[in-house]
Amino acid sequence: MRTTILSLLTVVFSAWMAVAQSRSAKTLNIYVIDVEGGNAVLFVGPSGESVLVDTGNGGDGAVRDAGRIMAAVRDAGVHEIEHLIITHYHNDHIGGLAELASHIPIKEFIDHGQNVQPNANIDPVLQQYAELYAKAKHTVAKPGDKIPVVGLDWRIVAAGGAVLKTPLPGAGRPNPYCASFKAADGAKTEDDESVGSYITFGKFRTMILGDLTTNRQFDLMCPNNRLGSIDLDILARHGNVNLDLLLYPLHPRAAIMNNGTRKGGQPEAMKVLFDSLGLADVWQMHFSLLSGQEYTVPGLFIANQVDEPPATVPVAPLVPPAPGRPLPPPPEHNGTAYYFKVLAQPDGTFTVTNTRNGFSKTYRPAPAI
């Protein structure tokens, strides 16, 4: 009898352990959404808790971008946004908020605080924003804060023009790429204020820094690397230049660029990426005319085409017009929009899928030496 009870307890304990292990093995799902050179990235943690970073464009693009975000939301099985982070108050990051909020409840709004670039176009958007967060939870983020997301370690590393001063665990080594940096002149903009996040799920690490400027990238990473390393870089600044002093010490295995057809991906930005040791692939939201074929990536890694694809694709990068002469309108993309879906495992393995063509690639942790 005693043996039977012990055997039964063993079976029950084994079953409980199997359930616990299956729960702990759930993935972190990330959806990098095409909002035409704006920003919207949905994170769904292993518990199902959601974090949305930015809401795409306003104006004529608001309905379009809210629809694209909601398509990813439905794919993820999300019924509310637990945490919405607005990295900064530019139209391509916050403009679609009111339209999105009409489709899904948002429980918490997180931002950097006061707008440093008031103007007639963004002020009405921020008034709508204030009305929305007055009915929910509103948090002004500071470097070093944690966003409470079950199963994730979500750290704020930049906000309000300030950056993390104390290195993350395991970080803090001298950064050899700082010596050649020269700060850009000019007053601080909303880009400088961007809320930047560093996210850890088990051994998997990623980050999303909004439009953090090169000056603030230097502040964050110099003279010591305060972040350590990452596996996936969700590139800041829409694929405009992310400095070597930011990228190289982090050693990402893959990067995703939320660029537009004529926004981000220019040669100087691509050169930094292509020279990054250990960076296997760059995934681009659009083929960039700024890079041409010279500096682009294979088509398998590009999520979206334009409504009327050209008969030929330019080899040379687009030459900017003379000062004072505007570019013609960019190619339109108002049809089906595809996103990148990332499934990250707690052992550091992650898979990126291009939903346009179903192409997937899995990145496994480097073996311990």
Image (cartoon, grey):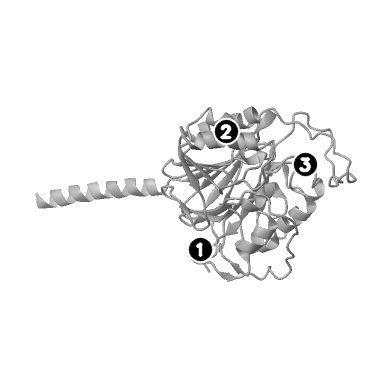
Which residue is rendered at x = 44% and y = 41% of the image? 49
Contact between marks 3 and 2 (CB within 8 A): the answer is no
For label 1, the residue is 168
Q: Amino acid at mark 3?
A: Arg
Mark 3 lies on residue: 262
Q: Is 345 left or right of 3, judged from the image as shown?
A: right
- Mark pair 3, 1: CA separation: 36 Å
Q: Secondary structure at mark 1?
A: loop
Q: What amino acid is labelled 2 in the image?
A: Gln
Residue hosting label 2: 128
Q: Identity of the amino acid at label 1?
A: Leu
Would you place residue 329 above or below residue 363 in this image? above
* Residue 221 in the image: above or below residue 50: below
Marks 1,2: beta carbons within 8 A: no
Percent from the top left, x then y, of residue 207?
Answer: 57, 53
Q: Which mark is residue 237?
A: none
Which is nearer the eye, 74 or 369?
74
